[in-house]
Image (cartoon, coloured by chain):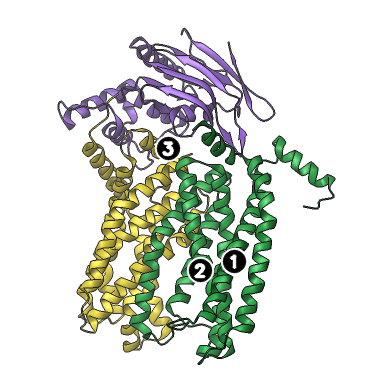
Chain colours: A yellow, B green, C purple
Amino acid sequence: MSRPALSTAFMALLRRDFLLAYRRRAELLQPLVFLLVVVTLFPLGVGPSPQLLANIAPGVIWIAALLASVLSLDSLFRSDYEDGTLEQMVLSGQPLALIALARIVAHWLVAGLPIVILSPVLALWMNLPEEGVPVLLKSLVIGTPVLSLIGAIGAALTVSLKRGGQLLSLLVFPLYVPLLILATSAVSSAVAGLPYNGQLGLILAGLIGALTLAPFATATALKLSLS
Amino acid sequence: MNRFMLFFHKTGSPPWFYGFAGKLIPWLWAGFIILTAIGLYMGLVLAPPDYQQGESVRIMYVHVPAAWMSMMIYAMMAVMGFIALVWRIRIMEVMMISSAPIGAAFTVIALVSGSMWGRPTWGTYWVWDARMTSELVLLFLYIGVIALYNAYDEPRKAAKAASLMAIVGAVNLPIIHFSVLWWNTLHQGSSFSADGSSIHASMLWPLLLMAFAFKFYYGANLLSRARLRLLKQDHRKRWAQEVIAEGLLAGGAK
Amino acid sequence: MLSVSNLSFERYFERVFEPVSFELGAGSLLLVTGANGCGKTTLLRVLAGLLEHSEGEINCDSRPLYAGHNPAIKDDLSVEENIRFLMNFMGQRDDSGGSDSNSGLCQNVIEIIGLAPVAQQEGRTLSAGQRKRCSLSRLLFCDEALWLLDEPYSNLDHEGIVMLDDILKDHLKGGGSCVMTTHGSLRPEGFELQECFMTSGRYSSEWQAA
């Protein structure tokens, strides 16, 4: 029995995912609106003092990005699991880790990248000084894929559960702690005029590690969820 | 070779494990009680009070071993989970998930005792120092594994999911620990380190004894929980029904 | 092609069905009948490799094609987009003309399964029978030799049943084989087949060769 080349299958999957995202584009906006609302709550909650907001800006923006990311992760595999596409993918003979990676890439492009694009607005609202904005963008560009990769493991483990979404947050938040610490430190250092490349370098190392390991853990979790 | 394989196969059999563990448990309890008695005597009575902290330093004889156990048990959970996942050995699944609540309990003990220690030392019940923050994140990792296990209906599937989660957590644990340590130096300087830089022998011995005592406790508690879980899982099988019948006959003494 | 001995699967530490043994050669059809809930679907999923068997052995010399209850249709994509995706993802390898020849094959497949009138309609508008036809389309563009079909006749109208029988006949004549489950009323007519019954015992099912 033959099957299509891996590249054909990979591209077919990406194309399908973009098509599906486009057909359901209203749903994609929900996590982004959530992101904006969460950040808005902070000045309302702690007072609009510019200095205070500037102090907590890196943390607030990154935490909001984390929350919005987890919100969109729940649906990563759910639809395919429920209509039987996932079983066909597992049985197709294509390497499951790469299928999972394709799914994660598509997900990041439609859910993670918009967070990066919206971040200057968030920086403005939180009064983040100018020096911090480029580093904020860099940290988000290399950090949000890590959120998607690690989150995918949790999504795969909870896809067959009825209220998996709640459990998903509990599972992945402890794993996000190092990323949160490094990213906010990078932005704060940039604002204070201190070096920040070490932190960004470590995040990049984390991204590479996640890229190599997370797809396999996700594939194992998907097979487990189907059994 | 054949005899070895037979032995290995036998250890995987629930009734054999049930019996063997049953014989081991009383010895483990005995070890725990003896070591705790000696350790606490040495720590609470014999050891000197700290130069700066006075008598309150004695909490460390519970706090530090508990923290060590919380981390050791998580590592063991990950190893057992790995064996269970790769070789599908049911006893490993049972032992892994039975370890989780014990590890979580040690984490809570470490946090509470650390908090009690903090009051006389730092003036407040909670400070975000590196070790306490790390323990707190570890507690959430434990809760995550336990919650994931309980969310699944079928026990073997639940155990496999929990095993994978434990392994992922264990891989991340050193990274989390070091990032929290680094975060702490960024924000507070090291004025809140909880135990002294070098430990005198009279303080070291009780610490080590308590650490061993807790290991015996873990062994005894783990085997008891594992036996109970096996009995519940196999309650329709003949070996389990015989054991239950014996227990009822003996007036439920066990 | 497929040989199974003492195969069983456990859930909640109990067997879902009693050990099963059979041999399936090229060109053969095995029909597994039984009432609802006797473990037919579970057996098929174990044969497909989605579930890990707890006892016994499976010897299969090729990867099977599994068509279960879930039709693998995306509601938001049209019939043609659905089929084209599956073709490009898991259909038989087509190195010749690139995506053009695939589109020709795609049209062909849609014609054969009788969904040409609704080819551009979204998946969510399809009736149960149409969804079944769409899910059976993969029998046409995948070249796996062993088919595992779970109640394939359910929801099909008369023409659908004839269509499936034709596809099945061609497959068996070409040397392929098939394990099919059915709960009794709908069954393949005019085929030479092995038949096995699964009946529910109190806790597990028993296997009897006809």
- Residues marked 2 and 3, same chain: no
Provide residue C97's location: percent of width, then percent of height.
14, 27
Q: Chain of mark 3?
A: A
Mark 3 lies on residue:
A84
- What residue is rendered at 60% in x and 80% in y? B43
Q: Is residue C43 visible?
A: yes
Instruction: State the residue in front, B170 or C23.
Output: B170
Tag 2: amino acid = Trp
Give the spatial CA distance, label 1 vs label 2: 10 Å
Give the numbered dot on residue A80. Answer: none
Residue lying at the far left of the rendered structure? C97
Q: Quadrant of residue C101?
A: top left
Give the numbered dot on residue B214. Answer: 1
Provide residue B58's location: percent of width, then percent of height.
58, 83
Picture layout, residue A84 above or below residue B225: above
- Residues marked 1 and 3, same chain: no
Do labels 1 and 2 touch, CB within 8 Å? Answer: yes
Picture layout, residue B29 above or below residue A130: above
Q: Chain of mark 1?
A: B
